[in-house]
Image: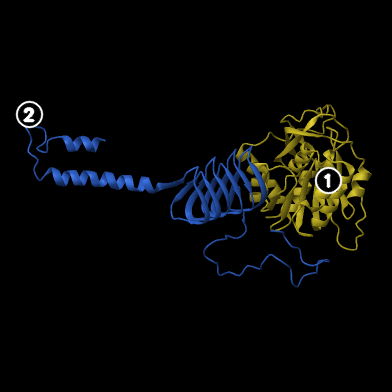
C-alpha cells in the first residue's frame, strides 16, 4: 500500500503546488516499474505458498507437486509432495497413498501415510491406514486405526547408508521358531 | 539401552510432557480403595505395566498390538521410547458398533477374523479391560486369536474386573508412568458383563502362561501372560 502512495507523489519530490500539473517525466516510469516489480515479486511467493484444492474438487489419479498443498476436496489415488507439507482440511476426503514431508490431517484419510518429518492428526481428523514417520502426534478426539511406525532405529529415506545393517525380518541361522518365521501383516 | 533403562527413561519423558503426578503410595494400608466407578480421569496404580514394559523393552523393535482406542500420548511413548511399531485395533469401537446394530451374536465370528496380523507376529498385546465387556463366546474367540498372534516370549497385559457393574461406557487407559495409568471414561452402550474367575480367564488363554497376577485396591485384577517356548507345555502358572 505504501508503495502505491509513493507512486502518486510528484516525482520531483515535495513540491506540491496545487493546480499545477506535474509533467510525467521519464523518472516516474522506472520508479513505477521498480516499485511494482518488487510488489509483484513479493506477491508471487505468497501466491505460490500454498495451493488449495477446494471442497467441490474431485481428483482421481496421481497428484504430485513441489509446494505445500491444502486439500478440502476429494482425492483418490496417490499424493506425493516431497519436501512439502500436505494439509487435509476439515472437508478433505482422501482415499490415497500419501507421501510428504509433513502431513496434517483435519479431515479424513483412508490410506497409508509416509512422512519424512511428522504426521499430525488433529482432533477432528480421521485416519484409517498405516503411518510411517519419525514423529506422530494424535490429538484427543481424533480417530485412528492402523499402525504407527516411527522407525527410530535406522533413518529411513533417501541416502542409503553404506553400513550394513543386519536386517530385521527372519532369523535365518538362529534357532528356528517352531512354525516358521514370524510375519508382520501389512 | 536395556529394557529397564528404557522404562526408567519413560518417567523423565513423561515429566517433560508435563504428565502425571508422582506415584502414589498405593500400598499404604490406610488407603481406602478408590471407588470402582471413579473412572473419571483419575489416576490409578498399576503393577503389571512395569513388567510388560520391561518385556517390550528387551526387544529391539517390538511389535505391539493395542486393542483399545488410540491414545496419542501412548502412541508417542511406545513409538518413541520403546521403538515399537504400534498397531491400533480399536476393538472397543467394533463392539460398540455391533451392540448398536444389534449384531452382537455375530461378534465372536467377527473377532475370529478381525485381526489382520500374521501368526506369531506380535511381541506385546495391550488388552486393557476389553474382556469385561465380552460375553463368553466373544471372549474365547478373542483369546484364541490373540494367542495365535503372539510370538514366543511375547506378553499380553489384561485388566479384569472382579465385580460386575450396570454402568455403560468404556475407559481409555492413558499411561502416566510405569506405575500409573489415568482412566478416561468415554461413552458407549456396552456394559461390563459378569466378572470371570481367574481360572476361567487363564483357561481361555490356553497357550499362554501367567507371568504375574495382581489384585489391586480398586478391585481390578491385572494379569500378565507370556507365551512360553515350545515344549514348555504352555501350562499356566500362578
Q: Which mark is residue B78?
A: none
Q: Where residue A86 sits: x, y (%)?
A: 50, 49
Residue ranking furthest to the left: A20
The alpha-carbon separation of the residues under discs 1 and 2 comes to 91 Å
Secondary structure at badge 2 equals loop
Name the residue rendered at 70%, 35% in the picture. B22
Q: Point out residue B73 in the picture as x, y percentages from the top left corner.
A: 65, 42
Residue A117 seen in this snapshot: yes
The colour assigned to chain A within the rendered structure: blue
In-image side of A25 versus B24 (left or right):
left
Give the percent coordinates (x, y) of residue A161: 55, 67
Which chain is displayed in yellow in the rendered image? B
> Image point 27% across, 44% down: which residue?
A39
Residue shown at 73%/32% (left/top)?
B187
Host chain of mark 1: B
Q: Residues within 10 Å of mark 1 (few under 14, many from 20)?
A: few
In the picture, the quarter occupied by the N terminus of chain B is bottom right
Q: Which residue is mark 2?
A: A17
Pointers 1 and 2 in contact (C-beta within 8 Å): no
Amino acid at each position: 500500500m505504501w508503495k502505491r502512495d509513493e507512486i502518486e507523489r510528484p516525482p520531483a519530490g515535495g513540491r506540491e503546488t496545487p493546480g499545477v500539473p506535474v509533467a510525467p517525466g521519464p523518472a516516474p516510469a522506472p520508479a513505477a516499474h521498480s516499485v511494482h516489480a518488487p510488489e509483484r515479486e513479493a506477491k508471487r511467493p505468497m501466491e505460490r505458498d500454498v495451493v488449495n484444492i477446494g471442497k467441490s474438487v474431485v481428483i482421481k489419479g496421481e497428484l504430485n507437486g513441489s509446494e505445500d498443498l491444502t486439500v478440502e476436496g476429494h482425492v483418490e489415488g496417490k499424493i506425493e509432495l516431497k519436501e512439502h507439507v500436505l494439509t487435509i482440511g476439515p472437508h478433505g476426503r482422501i482415499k490415497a497413498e500419501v507421501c510428504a514431508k509433513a502431513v496434517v490431517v483435519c479431515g479424513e484419510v483412508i490410506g497409508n501415510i509416509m512422512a519424512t518429518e511428522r504426521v499430525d492428526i488433529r482432533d477432528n481428523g480421521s485416519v484409517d491406514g498405516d503411518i510411517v514417520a519419525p514423529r506422530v502426534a494424535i490429538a484427543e478426539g481424533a480417530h485412528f486405526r492402523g499402525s504407527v511406525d516411527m522407525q527410530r532405529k535406522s533413518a529411513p529415506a533417501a541416502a542409503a547408508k553404506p553400513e550394513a545393517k543386519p536386517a530385521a525380518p527372519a532369523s535365518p541361522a538362529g534357532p528356528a521358531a517352531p512354525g516358521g518365521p514370524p510375519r508382520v501383516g501389512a | 539401552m536395556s529394557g529397564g533403562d528404557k522404562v526408567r527413561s519413560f518417567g523423565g519423558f513423561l515429566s517433560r510432557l508435563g504428565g502425571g503426578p508422582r506415584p502414589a503410595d498405593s500400598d499404604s494400608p490406610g488407603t481406602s480403595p478408590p471407588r470402582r466407578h471413579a473412572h473419571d480421569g483419575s489416576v490409578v496404580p498399576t503393577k503389571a505395566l512395569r513388567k510388560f514394559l520391561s518385556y517390550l523393552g528387551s526387544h529391539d523393535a517390538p511389535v505391539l498390538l493395542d486393542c483399545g482406542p488410540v491414545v496419542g500420548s501412548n502412541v508417542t511413548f511406545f513409538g518413541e521410547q520403546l521403538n515399537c511399531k504400534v498397531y491400533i485395533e480399536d476393538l472397543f469401537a467394533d463392539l460398540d458398533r455391533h451392540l448398536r446394530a444389534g449384531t452382537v451374536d455375530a461378534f465372536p465370528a467377527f473377532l475370529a477374523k478381525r485381526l489382520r496380523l500374521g501368526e506369531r507376529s506380535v511381541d506385546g498385546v495391550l488388552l486393557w479391560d476389553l474382556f469385561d465387556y465380552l460375553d463368553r463366546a466373544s471372549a474365547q474367540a478373542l483369546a484364541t486369536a490373540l494367542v495365535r498372534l503372539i510370538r514366543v516370549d511375547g506378553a499380553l497385559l489384561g485388566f479384569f474386573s472382579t465385580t460386575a457393574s450396570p454402568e455403560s461406557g468404556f475407559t481409555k487407559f492413558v499411561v502416566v508412568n510405569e506405575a500409573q495409568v489415568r482412566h478416561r471414561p468415554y461413552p458407549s452402550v456396552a456394559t461390563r458383563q459378569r466378572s470371570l474367575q481367574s481360572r476361567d480367564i487363564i483357561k481361555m488363554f490356553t497357550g499362554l502362561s501367567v507371568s504375574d497376577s495382581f489384585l489391586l485396591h480398586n478391585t481390578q485384577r491385572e494379569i500378565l501372560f507370556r507365551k512360553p517356548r515350545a515344549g514348555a507345555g504352555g501350562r499356566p502358572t500362578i
